[in-house]
Image: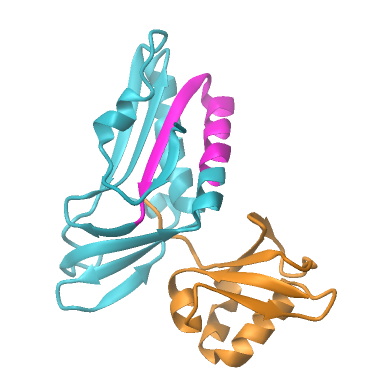
Amino acid sequence: MVVRVVTFARLRELLGFEWRAVTLAEGADASDAWAVLSADAPAIQSLRASTRFARNGRMVDADQALSDGDELALLPPVGGG
Amino acid sequence: MSRLRILADPIDPAQVEASVRGAAHGATACFTGIVRELADDGRSVSGLSYEAHAEMAVAEFERIAAEAIQYFGTCEIAVAHRVGNLAVGDVAVAVAVGAVHRSTALDACRYAIDQLKARAPIWKREMYADGSSAWRDNCPPDRQA
């Protein structure tokens, strides 16, 4: 399956893309997607604990199973206001 | 037009406040967040750059507004938050609440900006006069400016 990964702030800079189509095994979850991305960009590994995930605009746990066509957003600690 | 917005254009706080006025409202309370010239560590700031997951941010504003009404009473809430590059003195965020009485307006306004800073998927890069820059996470609520 293919999910659309969208990134923000320091994660966007370290990964080098705003969004990317990422191919994952059927049944993969957000942490699997993170593993694929961090294999290409080891610099993000230290940010795992502070990163939250959103599936199609809703916050989810890292073990949330993904589906083909999902948007998976990688959200660093926020800084609005 | 929705009163809860992420904007790439300059914010006029007076317009945000006007959007929550009404014949039933005896009070409005407003918060304006402005880019300041010094960072918390004293470094000279040349500007800020904000980015957001706009759809999720507006959805978070909606949840925060619903909570404020639940906690503090009937009111109308407007939120406008900038994205893009801002200079010192530019308005980064405006929150306005209109209500029958001042206590609801003031309490809801305080709640909305505190929760926005803690929860909304918005990110800020601080640019310094020496040419360097850094992403700035928000402090815990008890340390927020």
Can you say whether B2 is above or below B75 in the image?
below
Foreground pick, A32 / A26: A26
Chain B rendering hue? cyan
Foreground pick, B7 / A53: B7
Q: Quadrant of the N terminus of chain B?
A: top left
Residue situated furthest right in the rendering: A27
Coloring scheme of the render? by chain
Q: Is residue A21 left or right of residue B17?
A: right
For residue B51, what is the image quadrant?
A: bottom left
Give the image location of residue A7, x and y in percent: 53, 70
| Residue at x 50% of width, y 72% of height | A18
| Residue at x 44% of width, y 75% of height | A10
Is B75 one of the magenta-colored residues? yes
Res. A14 visible in picture: yes
Q: Is residue A70 left or right of residue A74?
A: right
Res. B39 visible in picture: no
Q: Give the residues drawn in magenta, as a range.
A: B60-83
Give the image location of residue B30, x and y in percent: 32, 31
Give the image location of residue B111, x and y in percent: 46, 37
Is A42 one of the magenta-colored residues? no
Give the image location of residue B82, x and y in percent: 34, 50
- The chain painted orange is A
Can you say whether A72 is above or below B30 in the image?
below
| Residue at x 43% of width, y 50% of height | B117
Foreground pick, B71 / B51: B51
Q: Is residue B116 left or right of residue A31?
A: left
Foreground pick, A10 / A17: A17
For residue B95, what is the image quadrant?
A: top left
Q: Is residue B41 left or right of residue B82?
A: left
For residue B60, what is the image quadrant?
A: top right
| Residue at x 84% of width, y 74% of height | A27
